Image (spheres, coloured by chain):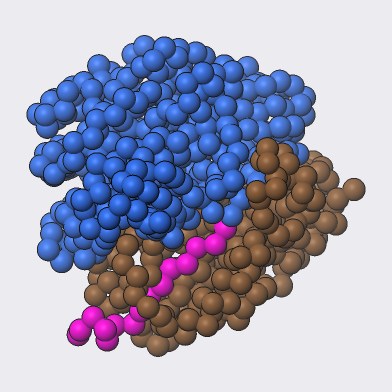
């Protein structure tokens, strides 16, 4: 197969830590096999070469936080046949969406001595708030095996198998003892989408929700159980307000506990 | 070509969003800007009001390549504020997972980001077509670093097992043994990497830097010590802001850090190496000497050899720690918050990472200050370009642009950290 016949892959970065795009380079055993099937057409973190679009598969990392990026994402969409947002920043606004609950002007003055140089939006928002997204991969960071599944599904023209159930399902299957029931450790497992492999409970700590809320969750009930473990209102706000703070159900639950 | 301009809008093979803009008039460089346009994320602002125990997990999200560095500097700072010191096997385990991060990050840079510049490829994937064994070895080495992070931390990016006071869970001695064989392979592969790196072509480019790193009596610096330099700095971490200051310039969303009295300084593998050569493990020292590197190396293009030497060090050190390991009775030390200020500085793969926090009696963060390696190296990178370009004006525009990019990549900049990517713009008037 010649180079031009392979589908073209592009990797885009918006406000983020680069961890999710690093996941692609972290597929050490699979990377060279991937490049046999996909042409890496645009991936600045890995290559100087830039092949013109349109791109068959675009992976978009990061959230929209500046006026310039709010325009750039539309160009990315126009140049992409299949657009997948990857990671909590791209799917929910990320940790930087904590600004959405505060006055961003005050934030700028805390960090930068000359605020006039800084251009930023009031809110950090997910990609889907700006353009149509074909698929989302959750996680802070994403799970590289889910990324491989997505690429595999794309190459074979099928739907990716990405479970929508909760971390509890994964945790039970691993045979972990429930950290919340047995140890009284607050855990977001019941309301968080699976995908990480229940690593936090496997290390004796509570899930902190980095894959974001699963579909139709009862966050209020979980918060009630946490209160019985002496978690106070301030801590409930913090628990629901982290890497997926601006995901709808987590946002509402954190606001419900704000004084 | 008397007047020219070199412009790279989006610098590749570095972490984050940045560019270069160099103006040349009458064969003189009149302006060099290493522009950083990574959108700011305001970590220091939203850390206010969070619990002291949350700082490691939150600050890890500043950088997907060196999360351990952030977790470690913040944990150390919080422990200092609370009057707790993590010692013995817990301290050793922290050093061990940090070795994992150095191996993963250095292997990524040496093989996938830096080597293609020397061998003339756009990226490691095209390089793999001609040098398959080299790229495969690099990937395997990187994987072993990541496997160590996964084993101790739960995952390679944003590990979950570190906390203020230690770890959530510690491995048994027997469990840890499974890392021995891979690390032995990695040690041999790292020695070969030093030999490979020493055969590359380097431009003559020795610079008079002020190197800054952590210095420790007995160890090659990773997570504890004073802050030292080759020009007289020798201070406790708590004095950092008395000697260093961050400046905000218009062409960058990353703050520029300088030594108040003297200006630019250099952090990272070369700084650690030059200041702490005598503390390297025996095999690392031997590999360096065999590669023709003395105890001093002032050519930033040779940082690829220094990173390879640090790979040897990290593998050897990891094996030593595993050999001496005994499982501690408790995975962490209980830490009760008390009002105060804490400082932490550790050696991220790309250099010194400083954190300072003020917390109240409930452990709520009042103020936070983070100085990342790349913001410290920005001025040195610009100085290097200003020195490099006039000597190389005979190169074609494309070759000079590439060399300028390489001059920046020598530092393995991590722009998400500094704020957070690079863009190169060379302008000919």
Q: Quadrant of the C terminus of chain B?
A: bottom left
> At 54% across and 21% down in the image, what residue appears?
B260
Q: Is residue A13 magenta?
A: yes
> At 34% across and 82% down in the image, what residue appears?
A7
Going by the picture, which residue comes out furthest to the right? A259
> At 81% across and 43% down in the image, what residue appears?
A234
Picture layout, residue B325 above or below residue B2:
above
Q: Quadrant of the N terminus of chain B?
A: bottom left
Q: Is residue A62 visible?
A: yes
Color used for chain B? blue
Q: Is residue B272 visible?
A: no
**Quarter holding residue B369:** top right
> Could you say which is closer to the camera, residue B235 or residue A92?
B235
x, y percent for residue B108 = 31, 49
Q: Is residue B104 left or right of residue B328?
A: left
Q: Is residue B32 magenta?
A: no
> Could you say which is closer to the camera, residue B354 or residue B170?
B354
> Could you say which is closer to the camera, residue B242 or residue A240?
B242
Color used for chain A? brown
Q: Is residue A47 left or right of residue B38?
A: left
> At 86% across and 50% down in the image, what residue appears?
A258
**Quarter holding residue A216:** bottom right
Q: Is residue A130 left or right of residue A137?
A: right
x, y percent for residue A2 = 20, 84
x, y percent for residue B75 = 56, 31
The segment highlighted magenta reads A1-15
x, y percent for residue A70 = 63, 69
């Amino acid at each position: 197969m010649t180079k031009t016949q392979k589908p073209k892959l592009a990797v885009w970065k918006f406000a983020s830590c680069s961890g999710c795009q690093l996941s692609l380079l972290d597929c050490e055993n699979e990377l060279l096999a991937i490049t046999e099937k996909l042409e890496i057409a645009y991936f600045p973190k890995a290559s100087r070469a830039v092949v013109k679009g349109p791109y068959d598969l675009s992976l978009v990392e990061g959230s929209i936080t500046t006026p310039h990026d709010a325009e750039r994402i539309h160009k990315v969409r126009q140049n992409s046949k299949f657009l997948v947002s990857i990671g909590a920043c791209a799917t929910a606004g990320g940790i930087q969406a904590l600004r959405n609950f505060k006055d961003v002007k005050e934030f700028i003055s805390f960090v930068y001595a000359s605020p006039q140089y800084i251009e930023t939006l009031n809110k950090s928002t997910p990609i889907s708030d700006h353009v149509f997204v074909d698929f989302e991969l959750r996680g802070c960071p994403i799970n590289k095996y889910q990324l491989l599944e997505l690429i595999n599904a794309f190459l074979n023209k099928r739907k990716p198998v990405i479970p929508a159930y909760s971390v509890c399902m994964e945790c039970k299957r691993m045979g972990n003892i429930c950290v919340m029931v047995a140890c009284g450790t607050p855990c977001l497992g019941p309301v968080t989408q699976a995908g990480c492999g229940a690593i936090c409970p496997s290390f004796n700590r509570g899930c902190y929700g980095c894959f974001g809320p699963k579909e139709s969750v009862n966050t209020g009930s979980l918060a009630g159980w946490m209160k019985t473990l002496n978690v106070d209102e301030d801590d409930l706000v913090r628990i629901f307000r982290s890497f997926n703070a601006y995901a709808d159900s987590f946002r509402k639950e954190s606001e419900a506990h704000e004084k | 070509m008397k007047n020219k301009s070199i412009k790279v809008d989006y610098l590749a093979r570095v972490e984050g969003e940045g560019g270069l803009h160099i103006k040349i008039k009458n064969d003189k460089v009149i302006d060099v800007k290493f522009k950083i346009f990574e959108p700011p994320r305001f970590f220091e602002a939203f850390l206010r009001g969070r619990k002291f125990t949350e700082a490691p997990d939150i600050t890890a999200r500043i950088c997907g390549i060196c999360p351990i560095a952030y977790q470690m500097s913040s944990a150390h700072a919080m422990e200092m504020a609370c009057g707790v010191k993590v010692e013995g096997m817990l301290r050793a385990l922290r050093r061990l997972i940090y070795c994992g991060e150095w191996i993963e990050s250095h292997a990524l840079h040496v093989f996938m980001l830096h080597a293609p510049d020397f061998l003339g490829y756009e990226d490691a994937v095209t390089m793999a077509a001609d040098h398959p064994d080299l790229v495969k070895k690099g990937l395997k080495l990187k994987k072993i670093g990541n496997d160590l992070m996964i084993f101790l931390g739960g995952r390679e990016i944003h590990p979950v097992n570190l906390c203020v006071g230690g770890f959530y869970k510690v491995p048994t001695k027997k469990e840890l043994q499974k890392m021995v064989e891979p690390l032995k392979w990695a040690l041999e592969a790292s020695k070969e990497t030093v030999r490979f790196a020493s055969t590359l072509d380097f431009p003559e480019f020795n610079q008079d830097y002020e190197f800054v790193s952590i210095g420790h009596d007995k160890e090659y610096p990773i997570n504890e010590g004073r802050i030292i330099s080759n020009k007289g700095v020798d201070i406790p971490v708590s004095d950092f802001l008395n000697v260093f200051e961050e400046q905000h310039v218009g062409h960058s969303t990353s703050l520029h850090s300088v030594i108040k009295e003297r200006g630019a300084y250099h952090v990272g593998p070369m700084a650690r190496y030059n200041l702490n050569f005598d503390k390297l493990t025996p095999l690392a020292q031997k590999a360096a000497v065999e590669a023709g590197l003395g105890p001093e190396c002032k050519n930033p293009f040779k940082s690829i050899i220094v990173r390879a030497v640090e790979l040897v060090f990290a593998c050897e050190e990891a094996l030593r720690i595993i050999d001496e390991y005994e499982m501690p009775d408790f995975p962490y030390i209980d830490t009760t918050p008390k009002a105060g200020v804490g400082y932490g500085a550790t050696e991220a793969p790309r250099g010194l990472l400083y954190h300072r926090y003020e917390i109240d009696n409930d452990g709520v963060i009042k103020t936070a200050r983070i100085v990342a390696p790349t913001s410290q190296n920005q001025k040195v990178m610009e100085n290097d370009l200003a020195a490099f370009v006039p000597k190389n004006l005979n190169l074609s525009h494309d070759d000079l642009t590439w060399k300028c990019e390489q001059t920046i990549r020598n530092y393995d900049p991590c722009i998400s950290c500094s704020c957070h990517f690079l863009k190169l713009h060379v302008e000919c008037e």
